[in-house]
Amino acid sequence: MKVMEWITTLLSIRPDAISVWSHPEVKERLSWYYRVMRNEMPAKFQIAKRVPVEADLFSQDLSLRDLWSLHEESSRIFRDYFVAVKKGEINIERLERPKHSYLDVKVAIAYRLMSPCRLCERSCGALRLEGKPGVCLVDKDAIVHSYFHHMGEEAPLVPSGTIFYGGCNFKCAFCQNYDISQVMARSGERLSPRELASIQVYLRRRGARNINHVGGEPTPHLPFILDSLRYLDVSVPQLWNSNMYMSLDSMILLEDVIDIWLPDLKYGNNDCAWRLSKVRNYWEVTTRNIKRAHEAGDMIIRHLVMPNHIECCTRPVLEWIAKNTPRALVNIMDQYRPEHLVAKYPKMYPDISRRPTQSEMSEAYKIARELGIVFEPVS
């Protein structure tokens, strides 16, 4: 599609995808993403590819501890490069591509963390490289159910080059994507990292503003996604659309390759998270990771307002955001509807067996305004 045709299509479907950039808070808070989106800056993974590492990273002689030492050293160099790139002091296209890079270190570590698996906080220990799936239902291959230009995401992200991965480390009773996350997670197409890269090239060259890694949940696919970036030869912002229940190690691997974060912060306490999604220590894990992500780059936080959960979830979530991630934009979502187990067994989930009322949504918006949260442009 030609540029003018693409703009005309975008204006007819989502005119706010253009007008949102006239909002000063949006442009300031998403400034890095905006510049990468417009090809004014290289995506972070491209910078990571230029940081040289003098080691055979895929040798079994290197221990995981050795790899983490290399990662720490390379991270310091990356940050120097990153600052210089932002200031216009370095053009990465003029830098030699090393035989082994900081990105390669991340890939090598990610595959080590995959079997026994401790990519997410469940640390289920599945021997995934032997073809044994974890709690997430993913084993040794990336599972992709679909990919397309998503026009229904937040305005600054549209059109979003969305890749829907199979499997999830949550077991949400109300999941709207339960078919690919839980019921038929393993029925998608199994793809190599090189094929994942080809999908990203296809989406970007046809107008995607970003590559949106989602699902299901992208965390079980972390090794394959990082590996795909080794083959990706076009600059495109990498977007992490996640429940943020990854391990601290996985979070550290992601920090220097993700250009914009789209985390979900749904529950304001651990009891609701266990009852409705079957995960432990939800609050401590997700807030830890979201706070780190906020320090690492641009962010839009999603909060799904659920019926009867304003005081136990919405209020504490918004209060935490206001205090801990003040630069983040927030999408206060009214899209909740009873799905999956809630739709099938509504008497088991009486508190969430209906959609939120207008009164509940108004209360959520009121809390956000009182806290000074910027949500209108992306909600």
Image (cartoon, rainbow, N blue to C red):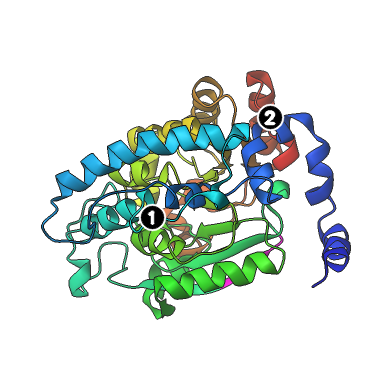
Residue placed under numbered mark 2 in the picture: 374
Measure how far apart labels 2 and 1 are at the Cα level.
42 Å
The magenta stretch spans residue 267: no
Discs 2/1, front: 1
Which three-letter amino acid code belongs to the residue tagged 2?
Val
Residue 73 % position (x, y): 29, 37
Mark 2 Cα-neighbour bin, 10 Å: few <14, some 14–19, many ≥20:
some
Front residue (pair 353, 215): 215
330 w.r.t. 200: above or below: above
Q: Is residue 148 visible?
A: no
Residue 3, image x, y percentages:
83, 64
Q: What residue appears at the point 29 percent right and 37 percent down from the top-left corner?
A: 72
| Residue 186 image position (x, y, % from top left) | 37, 76
In the rendered view of the protein, which quadrant contains the C terminus? top right
**Residue found at x 73% / y 48%:** 155
In the image, 199: left or right of 220? right
Q: Which mark is residue 348?
A: none
| Residue 41 location, quadrant | top right
Question: At which x and y percent is residue 334?
Answer: 65, 46
Q: Are marks 2 and 1 in contact (CB under 8 Å)?
A: no
Q: Is residue 262 above or below residue 296?
A: below
Which numbered marker is on residue 98? Answer: 1
Residue 252 shows in the view = yes
Q: Image check: 371 left or right of 315?
A: right
